[in-house]
Amino acid sequence: MTSESSARTSRRRRPRKEHSLWFKVAVRTVFSLVGLFLLGVIVLVVIYLRTGIPQPNADAQKQSSIIYYSDGHTEIGRIGQVDRQDVRLSQVPTTVQHEFLSAEDRTFYSNNGISPSGIIRALWNNLRGNPEQGGSTITQQYVKNYFLSQDRSVTRKLKEAMISIKVDHKYSKAQILQDYLNNTYFGRGAYGIQAASKAYFNTDVSKLTVSQGAFLASVINAPGLYDPQYGAAAAQRANARMVYVLDGMVKEGWLSQAVRNQQTFPTFSKPKAPDYGTGPKSFIIEDVKAQLKSQLHLTDQDIARGGLRITTTINQKDQNAAVSAVNKNVPSQTAQIEALHAGLVAQKPDGAIVAMYGGSGSAQTSYNSATQATMQAGSQFKVFTLTAALEKGIPLSRRYSGASPLVIGGTSFHNDLHEQFGDIDLDTALSHSVNTVFLQLNQDVGPKNTMLTAQKMGIPATDPGMTKSGSPDTDINNVLGVASVHVADMANAYSTVNNGGKRATPYLVQKVSSVEGSYSYQAHPKTTQVVDKSIADDVTNAMSHVLTDPGASAHASAGQINRPAAGKTGTTTGFMSAWFTGFTPGQLTTSVGMYAGAGKAAGTKSLAQAGQMFYGGEVPATIWLDFMQAALAGQPKTPLPPLSAANRAATATQAPVTTQPSTTSTPPPATSTTSSPSSSSSSSSSSSTPPSTTPPTASTPPPTSTPPPTSTPVPTAPRSTTQPPASQAPGGGPSRSTAPAAP
């Protein structure tokens, strides 16, 4: 064998060089990425080929949104009627056209209809669950207007890109810009630049100035944030956006610096109020729209475009009963009382609002008496103090003196009409709404706990008088209902008692769908246990005496319901507001509030004529009675829950604690004097000396001087169980407490 042959043999036997692991991984990764890329390209091509171009001004986009009763078939009303008048691009000043390009797409004339970076950013935000962001081209925005914008899925974004490329290839840039300007939502119910010119400036599009055009190009970014009708902050945002637009015009060579420097913030036309029709249903429609925005997070554009089918929680029979009850009882008063208003809200335990009366119609009044107007709550707040007392371990059998007046820190408080009571338990004190007893109870509980209990049960801290300078949570008077609340809030708070201590989130929208099927929503009722069930049941039992005890504040009115029920009256100083809120166990909670006055004067006129009275146990309780009897017709009578073992035992022993109200208690703050419009003194209290500014403390011990009599306590004045004269409240002796006039 030659040396050459030996060398060849040696080379054949040499092992092949093995590549390292990282090299193999890298190669395989590259091949995988290339494969995925090619697969992605194929998918995009398929999507592109299968995606058609929707027709301009599709009929589905012009349909109104329809609002239905809870049956999903009977119509309440419509919203989202489109205000649009198409114009040719030649009618739009060239400068105004460029302002829209400066605001939204400065490469409009050079791009192919999409912004890859914008698409990637939008997809990434969608995948992360973040809010939708901008970055789309004008072509993409135009295309998006053919889809219900509530659909913010990745699929819709891909379709948008595919259609945009096709539209850019099929139509001229001038046609795309014209269609964009005619189909964009500008706010104030205006679709298209012509409608927007009329809505904001009451002028034709051809007469728009540079500043007006810059504003319209700015407001489309977010009409709800940039329309100056929403306040100074919105105007500032719009101004900043206009600066961006006008500076961009200079940068792109579409506007000279000299003309740019001449521009100022434009003057606007007064916005037109939305037309929801007339009658009580108009307020329901208005509140439905508000809830679509606040709870479903739909934009004004989503709603204005239309095509939604909205099923509410409003029961047609119950709603008719509410309107009938108000119409039956209020007209007899309006002949004597100027601008009389009544609000009613009925709520199921899960938070569903089945009836709402906000007024005779938005054309007649500017405020929804059920959800917008606030009025001082009066003795309705005693329920919150009672709840806080039970949570602190004070039983319903705890007895206090009902003597009047009661002097606290130099301030004299008295019962309505100076009515006198002996030593009475909390059941009796609540049924007769005895001020002096509940002021003492509020000392033992602590005024702050009364306010915190009201809040956790459903009264928002933002309601007037709940939290403010002057610290109402340290004011002994807060038990008399100095805070001003919405009828809807009071219904929800009392529903917490009715629902075994579970606070519900009120809702008016049951479900929503779109005509194209691209959007759907289903309400999911939410409740939270905020009060122990046994305590809520005990409060219910105490409230039932308001209706069942002869001479109680609502016995002659709401007490005639002929089924187990519970509730509480409320009346304020000077009869500026009157309330009744009550429920049937586990079924329905209804609140009725009344006040007089219009506009800024709302709640500052007395409900009563000179020399007369207007109690919550009268007209409000009668409205409640008529409504509940009609709404519950045919439904079973549900029993009251049993008393807790603790209160059954305490009631059996009837252990007395106090006999005389304290005259040396720590006084309430200075804001309780009658000189303040938000004072916590009432028509059932008077101030003998100026109170100090030291707040009462929850630790102040109740007096224990003389034991009470063992006989059943009764008022010192006899009470008739027959219908009282007009100058008295139902039940004979008007013992209702009052709170100060609403500010």
Image (cartoon, grey):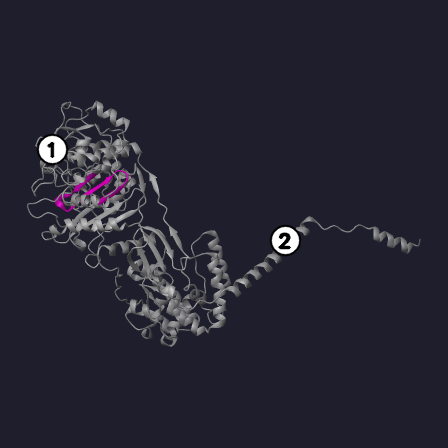
Question: Is 583 contained in the magenta span?
Answer: yes
Which is nearer the eye, 531 or 335?
335
Residues shaded magenta: 567-591
Q: Does the magenta run of residues contain 272?
A: no
Residue at 27% across / 48% down in the picture? 354
298 with respect to 563 (left or right): right
For the point 25% across and 56% down, the residue is 282
Q: What residue type is labelled 2?
A: Thr
Q: Disc number at residue 404? A: 1
Q: Mark 2 points at which residue?
A: 29
Residue 537 visible (yes or no) = yes
Q: Select label 2 or label 1 by which is in front.
A: 2
- Between 253 and 343, the one lying in front of the other is 343
Q: Position of residue 606 (x, y in %)?
A: 12, 48
On the picture, is 321 further left or further right than 288? left
Few, some or many C-alpha atoms within 10 Å of disc 1 (few <14, some 14-19, many ≥20)? many
Q: Is the magenta stretch mostly helix, strand or loop?
A: strand
Q: Is residue 729 left or right of residue 462?
A: left
Return the disc, 2 or 1, that comes first in the chain's sequence: 2
**Displayed quadrant of residue 185:** bottom left
Q: Residue furthest right?
A: 1
Q: Where is residue 248 in the image (x, y as percent from the top left)?
A: 42, 68
- Tell me what residue is drawn at x 36 percent, y 59 percent: 302
- Above or below residue 187? Residue 32 is above
Where, by quadrant of the figure, is residue 252 drawn?
bottom left
The answer to whether residue 467 is visible is no
Residue at disc 1, secondary structure = loop
